[in-house]
Amino acid sequence: MKAIIPAAGIGKRLQPLTFFLPKPLFYVGSKRIIDYVLFSLSDVDIDEYIIIVGYKKEILMDYLLKNYPEKRFTFVDQEKQSGLGDAVFKGLLRIKDFDVPLVILLSDTIINLNVKKFLKTVNSKLALMDVDDPKRFGVAKIEGKFITDVVEKPENFVSNKAIVGFYHFKSSKKLFESLNYLYEKDIRTKGEIQLTDAIKKLIDDGEKIEFGDVKKWIDCGDFKTLLVANNLLLKMEKKKNFIDETAALEKSNVIKNSSIFKNVKISNCKIKNSIIGNNVILKDCNLKDSIIGDNSNIENFKGSIICGENTIIKK
């Protein structure tokens, strides 16, 4: 089985953090986002991980090669972000055997899913979750255990079943042909090649696609959702906080829902619902709902702050 993981995006909603790091390498919970994505496949026999790269690709590639030497990675450039379908198509172009089972995972979402159980099906299968605002997502209409139609970010109500970033296709060849059809006919939604449109073509051609319900889907697309994701992951891991063993806390009270990473030094601070990167120095601070990038030095600050790497604030 092959895995395609699109990870080329700039992450504009997460600037200034993405000035320094690609989004999949952000810390959340007790790991980086990409670590959770790869961990979700740890019980599945994946013989090749095809990572679609673009923005700050060297940093992501270096991290994966150094930290996962046992995995076979193939890196594919998507220089211009032209839709999820375009990213997947570029990945499929690199697969020599065009008739293999395939999983596709988004690199900025974390799904609480028993993947091994999810993949036990004779048909292709998508992960769905009930949402309150379906206009923001690709959505699916269902009948019984099958998906009957999909629509990308519908203006009018179609369904509240959102497609949440985990896809399983029994035949990569059929998906390739469906995406290729979109290019041949120049079928685009909002100017982009959409995976949703390729799935719709598969269904229209008679492909049986099942669905599985997901109860927890963690989006890491902006500051608010990143902090919500941190809170949810700590709860899932049954932790009030994550504090790396190399962190030094002096006269400090770290309140719940915070993650503190390597070689952090904290003195006389209160921290709530925050993510503190590596090698950060905090002194006399009262922080809440904050994200601090690596190698930052902050003193005498009270409130919420989002700052990238190497930030210095001293009052």
Image (cartoon, rainbow, N blue to C red):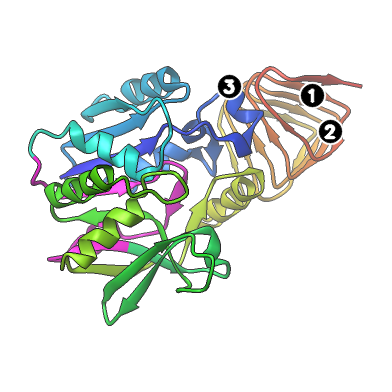
Relative placement, left or right, of 4 versus 34 is: left
Residue 120 drawn in magenta: yes
The residue labelled by disc 2 is 285
Q: Residues within 10 Å of mark 1 (few under 14, many from 20)?
A: some
What residue is at 58 percent from the left and 48 percent from the top? Answer: 230
Q: Is label 1 in a helix, a strand or a loop?
A: strand
Residue 23 place in picture, x, y as percent: 51, 34
* Segment colored magenta: 98-126
Q: Is residue 205 above or below residue 19?
A: below
Decide which of tag 2 and tag 1 comes sooner along the chain. Answer: 2
The CA distance from mark 3 to mark 2 is 24 Å
Q: Nearer the viewer, residue 291 or 174?
A: 174
Relative placement, left or right, of 68 versus 97 is: right
Q: Is residue 307 above or below residue 42?
A: above
Residue 31 place in picture, x, y as percent: 48, 38
What residue is at 34 percent from the left and 20 percent from the top? Answer: 66
Q: Is label 2 in a helix, a strand or a loop?
A: loop
What residue is at 34 percent from the left and 47 percent from the top? Answer: 105
Tag of residue 298: 1
Decide which of tag 1 and tag 3 comes sooner along the chain. Answer: 3
Relative placement, left or right, of 14 versus 250 is: left
Q: Amino acid at mark 1?
A: Ile
| Viewer-nearest of discs 3 and 2 | 3
Question: Quadrant location of the C terminus?
Answer: top right
Q: Residue furthest front?
A: 185
Q: Residues within 10 Å of mark 2 (few under 14, many from 20)?
A: some
The residue labelled by disc 3 is 20
